[in-house]
């Protein structure tokens, strides 16, 4: 998985796009199909999908069979949700409703192992319960981090958000952003 993350970062740094899709239905067969189509990444949506933490290991395992990067959009941008998704084997985290740099920094710190971050170190599904511990330690220092900009406050704080170390990608959430501006669904505005 570390090679997939490096490849995505290389594409982004050289102004090439990455191609991915979203999964909201908690069925590993869907994950396996999506992961095998050739997408760079597949995002498991825990914010708006009906996916619970106990389903993550099977969905992630199925996505990785096809060499796609399993990203997890956590239900809320809180460190505990990031840690759970990474322990289940996610290669990256999508953080919804990021409004300021402090919020983003705390979440990124929870995704990095010491000495870079504050994430706990231990055996989990993400390292095959210790079998792949060394590789896991190397990879999990730098999971792919995506911050969603979904409010007027976030737009106002964008220059500071962009300075946060460890951020890989910004993604606009157009429905929430337009709603926070009082123009829900009016994307041309």
Image (spheres, helix red, strand yellow):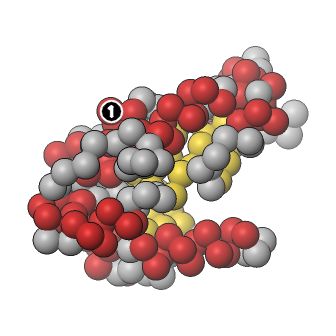
Q: Is residue 46 left or right of residue 184?
A: left
Q: Choose top left, top right, bottom left or bottom right for residue 182.
A: top right
Residue at image location 23% in from the left, 43% down from the top: 53
Residue at image location 38% in from the left, 47% down from the top: 114
Q: What secondary structure is marked by label 1?
A: helix
Residue at image location 34% in from the left, 36% down from the top: 81
Depth check: give the residue in front, 1 or 173.
1
Q: Is residue 47 left or right of residue 97?
A: left
Which corner quadrant holds the C terminus?
top right
> Percent from the top left, x then y, of residue 167?
62, 49
Q: State whether residue 65 is above or below residue 133.
A: below
Q: Does residue 95 show up?
A: yes
Q: Choose top left, top right, bottom left or bottom right for residue 19.
A: bottom right
Q: Residue furthest top?
A: 182
Q: State whether residue 78 is above or below residue 9.
A: above
Depth check: give the residue in front, 124 or 25.
124
Q: State whether residue 97 is above or below residue 146.
A: above
Residue at mark 1 = 80
Which corner quadrant holds the N terminus?
bottom left
Q: Residues within 10 Å of mark 1 (few under 14, many from 20)?
A: some
> Percent from the top left, x then y, of residue 42?
44, 64
Q: Does residue 46 show up?
A: no
Residue at image location 62% in from the left, 55% down from the top: 168
């Amino acid at each position: 998985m570390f090679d997939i993350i490096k490849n995505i970062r290389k594409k982004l740094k050289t102004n090439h796009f990455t191609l991915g899709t979203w999964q909201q239905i908690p069925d590993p067969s869907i994950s396996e199909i999506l992961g095998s189509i050739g997408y760079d990444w597949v995002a498991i949506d825990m914010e708006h999908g009906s996916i619970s933490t106990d389903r993550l290991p099977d969905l992630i395992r199925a996505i990785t069979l096809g060499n796609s990067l399993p990203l997890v959009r956590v239900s809320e941008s809180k460190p505990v949700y990031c840690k759970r998704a990474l322990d289940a084997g996610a290669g990256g985290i999508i953080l919804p409703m990021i409004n300021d740099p402090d919020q983003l920094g705390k979440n990124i710190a929870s995704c990095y192992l010491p000495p870079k971050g504050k994430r706990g170190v231990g055996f989990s599904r993400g390292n095959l319960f210790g079998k792949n511990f060394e590789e896991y330690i190397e990879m999990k220092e730098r999971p792919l981090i995506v911050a969603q900009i979904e409010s007027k406050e976030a737009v106002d704080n964008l220059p500071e958000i962009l300075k946060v170390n460890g951020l890989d990608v910004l993604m606009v959430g157009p429905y929430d952003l337009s709603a926070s501006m009082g123009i829900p669904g009016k994307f041309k505005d």
